[in-house]
């Protein structure tokens, strides 16, 4: 059912935590841009950047920082510590999401080696192997309805990131369920606190186990990093694990689901792929633009008054980046084909769905490679794959952050 986008006083847009009409919400945000005032779940107000040029500029602006100490509403006690979205804003600058400048560069250098283009390329054979194993396992369910998200789109990146960091395979499903709560916009304050502290304990236990039982994985490497006196503290290791394990699977899950959905909903575009006129790399990039895996990213905080597009973000105010709205920018992507159209022949514009500037997603190379491997192998194995329900029946998880379907029911061999 279509739901209208709610507008508050003075043109403020209220983001729907249940994500009933994401398409309309993106368009409303874009139309209100380049900077729009938004109301978030829990009665929290902030700014959103919704145009491409302004998005690139603000992601590179050193006057906008990640440190929550600069958020006036939080420091004045107007944001309760049980606000669920605080789970994505580190209370102390101990990871890539919560630091800027030299400290961010230090943490990035100590964690980026595994996610370099060269480092990721070494993973290609293993990604292909895991993909084939998952497709083989799906054969036994090929005659009935199957949740492609749970059985394939989740398991592939979770297995890859899990092997990289030494996460026990038996814990993958538990982590999936925890991160569903972690990213939810409708988690109760009590459940939010429980989820957040449970994940902290999980990673603390994991660090203690790796110290006692070193292994050939990236968690052990993090613990041994910085031999010249620049080592990571346990809090920094925990913060890094929290970021890479969450982002390392969530982004690819959404990319794979959104690509399958877009191809099945646009058979004329899919035909271009089948005929070899368009490559799978193009499918991945147009999916990232058309239906970004992250809807909104919170927050940066203004350290002084900043004017953008005729609007002033005052010192101490919060700004989020609305990737869904930015992907609809006509100035960047053209009027024809309309940016709200999935078009694999699009030849104008470049998306910034993995971010831009110093905070660009370090796992973007891995997500792209997983998509370019998994999608063709999936459709090669199951060329007649189709949705088991009408596209209009697909539901999003209740999150204003991640653009994630609850499930993707399909028929592999209808």
Image (cartoon, grey):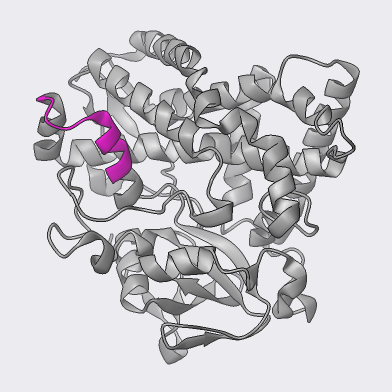
Spot occupied by residue 242 in the image (x, y as percentages of width and height): 70, 41
Query: In the figure, 136 relative to 233: above or below?
Result: above
Task: Give the residue displayed 86% in from the left and 15% down from the top.
Answer: 213
Question: Total label count?
Answer: 0
Q: Residue furthest front?
A: 228
Spot occupied by residue 187 in the image (x, y as percentages of width and height): 62, 56
Q: Is residue 284 magenta?
A: yes
Q: Nearer the viewer, residue 368 or 347?
A: 347
Query: In the figure, 48 relative to 348: above or below?
Result: below
Q: Is residue 92 magenta?
A: no
Quadrant of the rendering where the N terminus is positioned: bottom left
Classify residue 377 by image quadrant. top left
Classify residue 271 by image quadrant. top left
Left or right, residue 406 beside residue 179: left
Left or right, residue 66 beside residue 8: right
Spot occupied by residue 116 in the image (x, y as percentages of width and height): 55, 32
Task: Give the residue displayed 57% in from the left and 58% down from the top.
Answer: 186
Spot occupied by residue 130 in the image (x, y as percentages of width and height): 47, 14
Residue range corresponding to the magenta coloring: 275-286
Q: Nearer the viewer, residue 206 or 128?
A: 128
Task: Give the residue displayed 77% in from the left and 66% down from the top.
Answer: 81
């Amino acid at each position: 059912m279509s739901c209208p986008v709610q507008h508050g006083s003075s043109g403020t847009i209220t983001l729907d935590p249940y994500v009933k009409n994401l398409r309309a919400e993106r368009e409303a945000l874009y139309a209100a841009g380049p900077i729009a005032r938004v109301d978030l779940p829990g009665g929290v107000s902030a700014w959103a950047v919704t145009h491409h040029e302004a998005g690139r500029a603000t992601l590179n602006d050193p006057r906008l920082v990640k440190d929550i100490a600069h958020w006036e509403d939080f420091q004045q006690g107007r944001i309760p510590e049980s606000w669920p979205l605080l789970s994505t804003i580190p209370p102390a600058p101990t990871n890539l999401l919560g630091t800027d400048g030299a400290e961010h560069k230090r943490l990035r250098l100590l964690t980026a080696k595994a996610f370099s283009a060269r480092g990721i390329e070494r993973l290609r054979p293993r990604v292909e192997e895991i993909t084939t194993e998952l497709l083989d396992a799906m054969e036994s369910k090929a005659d009935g309805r199957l949740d492609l998200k749970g059985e394939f789109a989740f398991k592939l990146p979770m297995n890859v990131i899990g092997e990289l960091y030494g996460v026990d395979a038996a814990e993958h499903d538990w982590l999936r369920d925890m991160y569903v709560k972690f990213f939810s916009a409708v988690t109760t304050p009590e459940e939010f606190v429980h989820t957040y502290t449970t994940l902290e304990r999980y990673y603390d236990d994991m660090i203690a186990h790796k110290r006692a039982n070193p292994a050939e994985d990236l968690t052990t490497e993090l613990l041994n990093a910085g031999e010249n006196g620049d080592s990571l503290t346990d809090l920094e290791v925990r913060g890094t694990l929290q970021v890479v394990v969450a982002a390392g699977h969530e982004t690819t899950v959404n990319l794979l689901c959104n690509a399958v959905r877009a191809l099945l909903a646009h058979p004329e575009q899919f035909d271009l792929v089948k005929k070899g006129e368009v490559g799978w790399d193009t499918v991945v990039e147009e999916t990232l633009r058309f239906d970004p895996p992250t809807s909104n990213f919170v927050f940066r905080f203004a350290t002084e008054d900043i004017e953008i597009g005729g609007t002033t973000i005052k010192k101490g105010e919060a700004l989020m980046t609305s990737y869904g709205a930015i992907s609809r920018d006509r100035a960047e992507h053209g009027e024809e084909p309309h940016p709200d159209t999935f078009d694999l022949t699009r030849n104008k514009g470049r998306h910034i769905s993995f971010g831009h500037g110093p905070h660009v997603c370090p796992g973007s190379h891995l997500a792209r490679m997983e998509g370019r491997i998994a999608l063709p192998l999936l459709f090669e194995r199951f060329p007649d794959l189709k949705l088991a329900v009408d596209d209009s029946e697909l539901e999003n998880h209740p999150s204003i952050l991640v653009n994630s379907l609850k499930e993707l029911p399909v028929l592999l061999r209808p």
